[in-house]
Amino acid sequence: MDVADLGLPVDVPSTALFTDHYELTMLQAALRSGTAARRSVFEVFTRRLPDGRRYGVVAGTGRVLDAVENFRFDAGVLRFLREREVVDEATLQWLADYRFSGDIWGYPEGEVYFPGSPIMRVEGSFAECVLLETVILSILNHDSAIAAAASRMSSAAGDRPLIEMGARRTHELA
C-alpha cells in the first residue's frame, strides 16, 4: 500500500503504529490463551465532562473509519516490531494478515453527547478490536474536544466573527 493512499496529513508508514505497545502484548496473550477469537464489544464513552461543560460534540468518525480501513501491518511495520521484540513470531504472523472484519456503530458526526453515553461501539473478535483501541480513542478524543470547544466558542460569540488558533498545535500525529 502506498502511504499516499492512507489520506493522512503527513507521511506515516501505517496507522497500525498508532496503537500502544500493551495492545500488541494483550493480543499475544490472547492468541496464546485461545481467547483471541472471542466475540467482544468495545464501547467508547466519556465518564465525565470538565467542570462547567454540559455536553460534548462527536467528531472524528470519518477519520476513525479511514484509520480502521487502513490499519495494516505491512512488511516494514512487522520488521520494526520484530527487531524490537515487541511480540513473538506467531503474533507477527497473525498481524501480517490483520484486517478488521467486525462492525462499528456510532453517533453521527456533530451529534451532541452526554457522560456515560456510548458514542461508538466496536464489535468483533477480541484480537481484532483490542488493536484499534488507542487509535480510535486518540482520534475521537482530539476531534470531539475541538468540536465541543468550537460549539462553546460559537455560542459565546453569538453574531460576532470568530477565529480560533490553538487547535493547530494539537493532533495525534503532533
Image: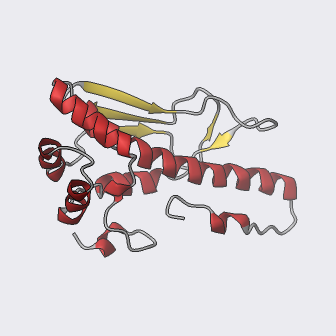
Drawn side of residue 134 relative to residue 4, left or right? right
User: What is the residue that sits farthest to the front in this orientation?
Assistant: 84
Q: x and y percent of residue 160 in the render?
A: 87, 66
Drawn side of residue 69 relative to residue 170, left or right? left
Colour style of the rendered protein structure: secondary structure
**Residue located 58% across and 52% down the image:** 142
Total numbered circles: 0
Residue 132 in view, yes or no: no
Occupied quadrant, residue 46: top right
Q: x and y percent of residue 95 in the render?
A: 19, 48
Between 52 and 73, the residue placed more toward the observer is 73
Q: x and y percent of residue 33 in the render?
A: 18, 24
In the image, is residue 115 above or below residue 174?
A: above
Q: x and y percent of residue 134 in the render?
A: 43, 45
Between 126 and 143, the residue placed more toward the observer is 126
**Residue located 33% across and 51% down the image:** 68
Drawn side of residue 44 relative to residue 146, left or right? left
**Residue located 67% across and 63% down the image:** 167
| The N terminus, quarter of image | bottom left
| The C terminus, quarter of image | bottom right
Drawn side of residue 117 relative to residue 73, left or right? right
Between 53 and 81, the residue placed more toward the observer is 81
**Residue located 75% across and 35% down the image:** 54
Residue 109 in view, yes or no: yes
